[in-house]
Image: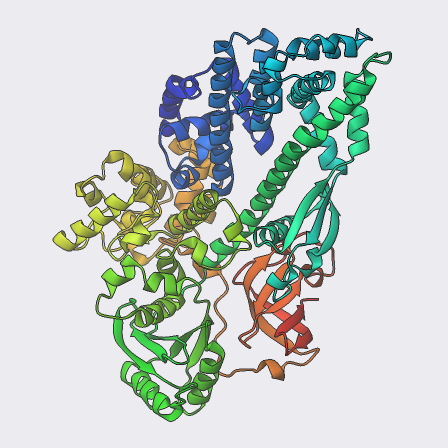
Amino acid sequence: MGVTLNFKFIYDTILYKVSKGTKEKKMDIIKILQEELQIKRSQVENTIGLIEEGNTIPFIARYRKEVTGGLNDEVLRKFHERYTYLQNLEARKEQVIRLIEEQGKLTEELKKQIETATTATEVEDLYLPYKAKKRTRATIAKEKGLEPLAQLIKAQETANIEEIAAEYINEEKGVSTVQEALQGASDILAEGISEEANFRSAIRKVTFNEGMIVTKVKDAEKDEKEVFKMYYDYTEKIKSMPGHRILAMNRGESEKIITVKVEAPIEKILLYLNKQIIKEDSPVREYLTATLEDSYKRLIAPAIERDIRNELSLKAEDGALEVFNKNLYQLLMGAPIKGHTVMGIDPAFRTGCKIAVIDATGKKLDNTVIYPTAPQNKTEEAKKVLKALIEKYDIDLLSIGNGTASRETEKFVADMLREIPKTIHYVIVNEAGASVYSASKLATEEFPNDDVGVRSAVSIARRLQDPLAELVKIDPKSIGVGQYQHDMNQKRLEENLSGVVEKSVNEVGVDLNTASSSLLQYVAGIKKTVANNIIAYREANGRFLTRKELLKVKGLGPKVFEQCAGFLRVPESKEFLDGTAVHPESYKIAGEVLEALGYTPADLNQGGLKGLSKKAGDLGQLASKLGIGEMTLEDIIKELEKPGRDPREDMPKPILHSDVLDLEDLKEGMKLKGTVRNIVDFGAFVDIGVHQDGLVHVSQMSEKFIKHPLEVVKVGDIVDVTVMSVNVQTRKISLTMK
């Protein structure tokens, strides 16, 4: 309760300085966020306050539940992104109003329209007539003195317009004929029509609702694998296009294989403009009809096409990002396989398979190179080397990368394991990004005396032991669980994926005494400099003995400590709670909880208090008695029941192999277990142990209709599948989960 009261004081002092606008403007933002996210007004207000106070999303999600009303990490990140957009929109509105006012053209009506606009597109439409332009046909015509003629035509009150136009002939200004005068006036009117915000809005709406996307082949020869063949002659309604097709079209267009056009209902649009502009008894109907047609085709249509294409791409990006985020989260949260000495194998042909042996803590014990595949084919020699390493280090688990030569290496390993009397398993690991890591500055610092192949083998082994700790060293875009990630806004993609990594790291928690700088940088509140300072302090002073010791680290002040402390673990600390997710600000409360339920801190040393939640009974009543929030109390009790619990324990374990199937061995109707490796809009790719992932189309995932694969599966899931068809030539495998 103390936290909430303190926060309210902060909120009252900062809330309305955020937008530098009026109270009414800020209220609009609050209302928009409230309606869009379907949350209470108080939740919006309180969350804004927490963000403006400088709190991180993981900290807010975990330790300020009472203040936000229990908003989770995902909602808070959407909230933050949208809040930032609305803040920037308010700033742009203020700028546009100022720029128009400086021109002396700002009316109260226009100001109100700008202030009440809810999108950047609306604001830019309203600003367009007042925006500084390059020389256009209209500006040139104005320079020739033709604007009064344009106004006369617009008024539609003069029948003898050709006679009046003759008065504007001026050789010095470049107007030689009546036709040139009328054309110049028409250019002025066309530009004015194109800049009417209401017209643009209506045309944009009808184009989106009734228009079509049409694609045609441009250069089929560039499409060697016929990836874009379905778009060689393709038409689809704009409003019904799924995201993955939009992104596919965008890529095909950027690679100059296809052309993409928007086909609008032109007749309907021209009829609309006619009704809006031309009077029933207009004496200049002929001129205006031609003018508005020119305005639409030359000025409005291209702009609307750009707007719609951009809107489609953004929506497609939103969908792709959501899939990418969820795939990445599942991969990062993969169940670790602890307590094993692991042999990592980075397959290759000519250069040989790089081998690295690492102990249960991830430390490299040994490395070598073998040549079991073509062109060397030193199979027996390679077996001898691996058998010796397996015996020397008591290895019972092998991790094989799924890149080039993986299939051949897997067969070699399976054959070798049959010759060893003890049970040894292997796992095929997604090695995406391993090469990126192996060539990185971080890998060079970690293994200065090893080549990139050895570093890659180490990474492949560590991914099995602790996927999260290893994958944080790699740019999330390089991990390979997305769709069309290279076609998205890279800054937005990076921000989103970094948020997923941050969420995963903080959800699991980090051992302060073993974490790398790469891992520490994703802990709430900790930047690169502070992460490096933590490592430097650890190297200079030895292991951290308490969480409080963090305050001795250079650059880590009280605010950073507040944000990060709950996510950092010190299992060796004399303060038992230092090894849990209980925040130091709640240690006193945790002690009171124990006392209220008849325990002492010493009881925690046994490894947790099972059944504590049952003994607590009515949490609302207990929370009221202790003067704390119910959600905070619930989190504390969960942590006291199972201190330092790793949420990844509940994730599916990797499938351990001891034998191997060939693609040619697959038969229609064969039932297999597989691991979901990647999810896209149209289905899921499943590893069934034949090196080539099979596709379960979304239509084959369930007996009932589903819109998206994520409704049924997630990356890392172990699923039962049946082979529907196998094309050995194209190496395509169709699977079903029905």
On the question of residue 603 being in view, the answer is no
Residue 12 sits above or below residue 556 on the image: above
- Image quarter where the C terminus lies is bottom right
Q: In this view, does 157 lie to the left or right of 668?
A: right
Q: Residue 586 sits in which quadrant?
A: top left
- Image quarter where the N terminus lies is top left
Position of residue 511 measured from the top left corner of the image (x, y, whole percent): 29, 54
Q: Is residue 128 left or right of residue 561?
A: right
Q: Residue 431 sits in which quadrant?
A: bottom left
> Is 236 or 475 nearer to us in this picture?
236
Residue 666 sits above or below residue 34 on the image: below
Position of residue 721 measured from the top left corner of the image (x, y, whole percent): 64, 71
> Is 103 or 563 nearer to us in this picture?
103
Q: Which colour scheme is used?
A: rainbow
Q: Residue 593 sits in which quadrant?
A: top left
> Is 342 or 275 nearer to us in this picture?
275
Residue 605 sits above or below residue 210 on the image: below
On the question of residue 356 being in view, the answer is yes
Q: How many marks?
A: 0
- At a point 78% along the width and 35% down the height, the residue shown is 265
Q: In this view, does 317 lie to the left or right of 371?
A: right
